[in-house]
Image (cartoon, rainbow, N blue to C red):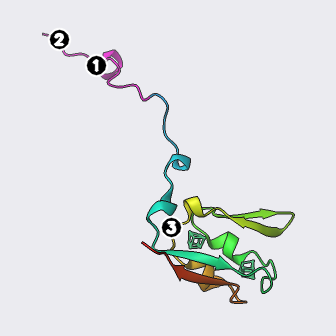
Amino acid sequence: MKLKTWRELEEGAVIRNVPTSLEYKTGEWKRESPLYDSEKCTHCLLCWLYCPDFVIKVKDGKIYKFDLDYCKGCGICAKVCPKEAILMKEEKI
Ligand code: SF4
Ligand code: SF4
């Protein structure tokens, strides 16, 4: 029997409706949430730059919202903030 070449192989699988990270709300398993104090914030945007999950939303150069559905509670935003405008608060389970 002659073996097929890779070009002759049939497709093994078709992935339909490829999921995106938008469907995985990491905020559901976080243990801490950022508490943002707009009075202390100077909008330097360091937290926005460092947040690994694009939780911090900016419009016209200013923070307007934390989308906590996608926050994993890592605390990086609080760590990099030079004005201590973000405090991490423990989640109640
Ligand atoms: S705690 Fe982490 S994931 Fe949540 S907003 Fe701050 S940097 Fe982003
Ligand atoms: S790092 Fe602090 S001061 Fe800078 S934008 Fe974020 S919350 Fe505001």
Can you say whether 64 is above or below 77 in the image? Answer: above
Where ligand 2 lies, by image quadrant? Answer: bottom right
In the rendered image, residue 24, in percent from the top left (x then y), is placed at 49, 51
Q: Which residue is mark 3?
A: 72
Give me the disc on residue 5: 1
Q: Is residue 42 left or right of residue 32?
A: right
Q: Is residue 63 left or right of residue 50?
A: right
Residue depicted at 73% across the width and 82% down the height: 37
| Magenta residues, start to end | 1-15
Q: For residue 4: magenta?
A: yes
Mark whose residue sits in front, 3 or 1:
3
| Secondary structure, magenta segment, majority class | loop
Residue 76 or residue 25, whichever sits in front = 25
Residue 91 or residue 52, whichever sits in front = 91
Amino acid at dot 1: Thr
In the rendered image, residue 10, in percent from the top left (x then y), is placed at 32, 17
Q: Which residue is mark 2?
A: 2
Q: For residue 29: magenta?
A: no
Residue 84's quadrant in the figure?
bottom right
Q: Dot 2: what SS?
A: loop
Can you say whether 19 is above or below 51 in the image? Answer: above
Mark 3 within 8 Å of ligand 1, using the beta carbon: yes
Q: Which image quadrant: the C terminus? A: bottom left
- C-alpha distance separating marks 3 and 1: 46 Å
In the rendered image, residue 68, in percent from the top left (x then y), is placed at 60, 64
Amino acid at dot 2: Lys
Amino acid at dot 3: Lys
